[in-house]
Amino acid sequence: MTDNDKVSVIIPVYNAGKFIIDCLDSIKQQNINLEVICINDGSTDDSEKQIKQYCVSNLFVKYIYQDNAGAPAARNKGLEIATGKYVMFFDADDILLPNALKNMINILENKTADIVIGDFNEVDEQNRVLNAVKQKNFILNFHNHWCFAQCPPLPGNKLIRKSILDNSKLKFENLKIGQDLNFYLKLVSFAEKIVLTEQPVMQYRIVTGSISRQYTLKILDICNSIDNVKKYYVEKGIEDKYDKYVSVIELIAYRSQLEKMRNFPNKEDRIKIKNVLWPRIKNCHVPFYKFRKTYYREKIKCILIILRYF
């Protein structure tokens, strides 16, 4: 590993005072050449104070403030100023495991890859492991980068070669739901080589009351995320790749939101959810044969959910 192998870790921060120092310490302990770019997205707690104090003795950390504009805008701002050869988008309440970045860089270089994806653990607010998520369970057995399309889209377990982001000009979209999914499905479309490390690289924290666990009809904004991805594929002239490899992920996304009907006691809300998602579920394209087992299983799940609530 050389001095040129710098990693830029970009962290959007919104009221993360409870966890941000643990997060920064876990990155500091990686013992590699890195910069951490903290974008304070209009926090109202003591996040700013904590990060500024941390910067005094940790010069690898950069602090930037923006008026509240959401995590996508914060990540995009961080990417604009990132100077590393590699980029990781990380969340302020998560933990990077020891030697994760060093191992991921070695794999990227040895395999001459664009992206490396690692396993991760889901943990609670006390850092107790709830679930070990193995990426190999989502990877299908065929030989091109589309076999990684079904991997969970969270960004914190992925190290990306910055040159492919620069060349593609890929940005995070300003979406309420499905921001990470939208970014990942676009990323997969132009990454020529993706590789896996089965070593856990991070602790993904499940935080009670987080935006991803608040249930309103905003869950239907998943449609905006999917439509934006479809438009991207059409504009790139690879709509056939969407039908072949991505349509099954679209179906999974709709099923995931459909399952949240259990959190809507009001029948009128459930009817609205069904009326929006069910026509889209029915119209999802039948994918490449390697994905069809998943496709039909997801279709059956959707039908059973509908039957349960209607």
Image: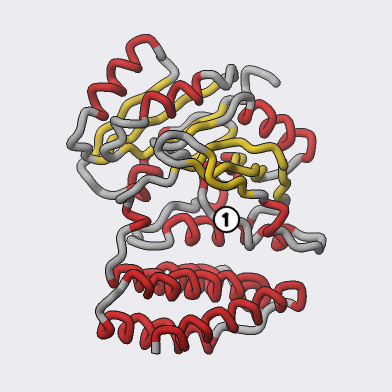
Give the residue at x 44% y 36%.
10
Toward the top, the furthest residue is 57
Quadrant of the drawing holding the N terminus: top right
Quadrant of the drawing holding the C terminus: bottom left
> Badge 1, how many Cα within 10 Å: few under 14, some, many 20+?
some
Please state which amino acid type lies under the numbered disc 1.
Pro
Give the residue at x 66% y 72%.
241
| Quadrant position of residue 262 | bottom left
Task: Inspect this view and state whether residue 163 appears.
Answer: no
Q: Specify how the rendered protein is coloured.
A: secondary structure
| Quadrant position of residue 279 | bottom left
Is 143 left, or right, of 188 in this rendering? Answer: right
Along the line of sight, which residue is nearer the eye, 31 or 144?
A: 31
Which residue is identified by label 1? 152
Give the residue at x 42% y 82%.
277
Q: Measured from the top left, where is residue 217 in percent x and y?
A: 29, 72
| Quadrant position of residue 125 | top left
Is 36 left, or right, of 53 in this rendering? Answer: right
Along the line of sight, which residue is nearer the eye, 121 or 144?
A: 121
Q: Element type at marker 1?
A: loop
Along the line of sight, which residue is nearer the eye, 249 or 306?
A: 306
Q: Measured from the top left, where is residue 126 in percent x and y?
A: 42, 34
Q: Measured from the top left, where is residue 204 in percent x and y?
A: 49, 42
Vertical placement of residue 51 versus 282, above or below: above
Toward the left, the furthest residue is 44
Give the residue at x 71% y 73%.
291
Task: Inspect this view and state whether residue 58 appears.
Answer: yes
